[in-house]
Amino acid sequence: MYLDIESAYQITSRIAGIALILSSLEEISLRKDYMPGGVYDLHYIDAALRHGDDARTRTGVLDRSKFHLTWPVVRLAAALTLLLGPNTMVQMAVSWTIVALTTFAIQGRHRLGGEDGSDQMITILAISFSVALIFGFCPGVREAGLYFIGAQSVLAYTTAGIAKLLCPEWRSGIAVCGILSTRSHGMRGPAEVVQRSRALQYLLCWCTIAFEVAFLSAPLLSPMPLTALLTVAIIFHASIAIVMGLNGFFWAFVSTYPSIFFLNEAIGAHL
């Protein structure tokens, strides 16, 4: 076995803890924007979206000024225990439950969205691990938590690849160039290099499509090809973190790799 159950949870929790720390610090840095009169004043947003009594109740309970800092700070503390703590099964159950609850509270403030794939993956991970660890006394539940996250990660990569495959901009090779040219996710140096080479544009788009679609085979691969695929994925996410500034994607998705290994071995044992 690549990993025993406890080690898989521990490694995943430590890596995901870094993603949670980064996300929580970002939320803390935005606290003033959620205060009355701020850019994200939720009373104005709810009024603009014409939300009714449900929104007013939610605003009153979850979005009071004192809670704008409370939720991310509590989640930050739980994330630190996942990264630095002993990560016993009991401690991880408590920490992941706190993470799940505070994540729901934080997401309740995001009326207009703004969450990306890494936020969604961490939310799914928090819910799955908290449930699996709380009910870990039931036979097979802890294993099911790892299987689910492994399958969810494979599904995320595969659907992303298929979506790109169906997109004309990705098939023609212009998508990467367009992304690198944006103000929010671009970088002038790499953008200029890619813009000068049509062949490079085409290569980058199709390599991205190919590696993401290849994740469909991850549960069935032998150890060496699976390790190679995940190594490519790590390089891919590291490059995105450097060039596009999407640091959360690296830690959120890499944290699911122990579960992919665990799922792969379970399926391999039955083939």
Image (spheres, rainbow, N blue to C red):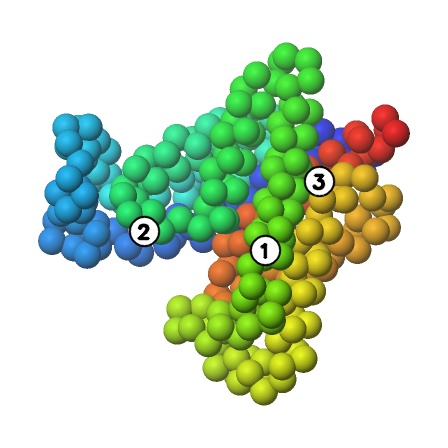
Image quadrant in which the C terminus is located = top right
Disc 2 crowd rating (10 Å Cα; few below 14, some 14-19, many 20+) is some
Residue at image x 19%, y 33%? 55
Question: Disc 3 marks which residue?
Answer: 260
> Is 231 on the left or on the right of 10, as rendered?
right
Viewed as shown, does residue 257 lie left or right of 241? Answer: right
Which mark is nearer the camera, 2 or 1?
A: 1
Residue that numbered label 2 is attached to: 28
Q: Where is mark 1, residue-wise?
A: 166
The reply, left or right, for residue 43 in relation to residue 128 is left
- x, y percent for residue 200: 66, 78
Q: Amino acid at mark 3?
A: Ile
Name the residue nearer the viewer: 125 or 87: 125
Q: Residue at x 75, y 44 (%)?
A: 218
Q: Mark 3 Cα within 10 Å, few/some/many (few <14, many 20+)?
A: many
Question: Front-most of 221 and 30?
Answer: 221
